[in-house]
Image (tube, helix red, strand yellow):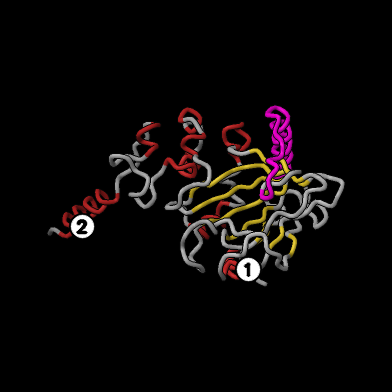
Amino acid sequence: MTDDPIEQMRAEGFTILRNAIEPDLIDDLLEAVERLERDLGARPAMNPFEGDRTVRIYNLLAHGEIFSRVPAHPSVIPVIDAVLGPECLISSLASIAIDPGQTAQPIHADDQIIPIAKPHAPVVCNSMWALTDFTEENGATRLVPRSHLGPNPDYGANYPTIPAVMEKGSVLVWDGSLWHGGGANRSQGRRTGIAMNYCAGFIRQQENQQLGLSPELVGTFSPRLQELVGYGVYRGLIGQIEKQSPAQRLLGATDFTMMWDREELAARRKTRDDCP
């Protein structure tokens, strides 16, 4: 198998970026997740998909500056951009801590509720940051290689899988059509990760970022992160309001021109340049 992560994504449906994140950031994220769990009193959701021994905390961008360092990390975002395009969006950002005794999550595809025929071009691309080592014993994500090239799985059916074993600081990235599920934790320790999920710019986000994050908070983000949470406009058209981008309307940005106006300006420039 090729060492190129983009080619691995196309062929196998996933890639693992080994030791991609600086150790200090991983340690700080793990500390922040554990602190949030205590402060919020987070508990398992007690359903078959989210688990009865798995603690999940959603909408992490609203819970501290440390999490704003995740979505556009330079070790990961180039792979996401190559799969979905540079106008992709954050779909959701959550922590997932699997405790001992958790059974395996049902096998599923992250895009299987989207009603378009498969196989299709990627519309979802997700990632899992390993804040602890991921082993077969402690619940490493289970994958069905090359399944992104076929139809949806029968939710919860049994399929041959492989574990995404990786060291703390590594990142698993997969096509949203790939069949997968969290593994069973048969160890004595917790497996903690951050699920950093993305979608194409024309797909509705799983977590409503515009309601979940205040404009005041988004105003503190970098321009790229503002675009990732949905304050940009896809191809100059999708997501605008009265020919303004959300960043213009809410943050006072001035760098957006709607696609039809761009075409008119380009035509005028061409006419001017063609004149003798």
Q: Indicate the amino acid at tag 2.
A: Lys
Q: Is residue 112 left or right of residue 188?
A: left
Q: CA distance from mark 1 to mark 2?
A: 45 Å
**Tag on residue 79?**
none
Return the residue nearer the eye: 35 or 72: 35
The segment highlighted magenta reads: 21-49
Residue at the image point whose x is 84% and y is 52% from the top: 186
Other-residue count near label 1 (Cα within 10 Å), few / some / many at <14 / 14–19 / ≥20: many
Return the residue nearer the eye: 106 or 255: 106
Query: SS for tag 2?
Result: helix
Magenta: main secondary structure: helix
In percent of width and height, residue 115 lies at: 47, 60
Return the residue nearer the eye: 139 or 112: 112
Q: Is residue 81 left or right of residue 70?
A: left
Q: Which residue is mark 2?
A: 270
Q: Indicate the amino acid at tag 1.
A: Glu
Residue at the image point whose x is 72% and y is 49% from the top: 130
- Of callouts 1 and 2, which one flags the residue occurring earlier in the amino acid sequence? 1
Q: Which residue is mark 1?
A: 12
In percent of width and height, residue 43 lies at: 71, 36
Other-residue count near label 2 (Cα within 10 Å), few / some / many at <14 / 14–19 / ≥20: few
Please, which residue is most extreme toward the left here? 276
Q: Are marks 1 and 2 in contact (CB under 8 Å)?
A: no
Membership of 46 in magenta stretch: yes
Res 9 quadrant in image: bottom right
Query: SS for tag 1?
Result: helix
Res 164 quadrant in image: bottom right
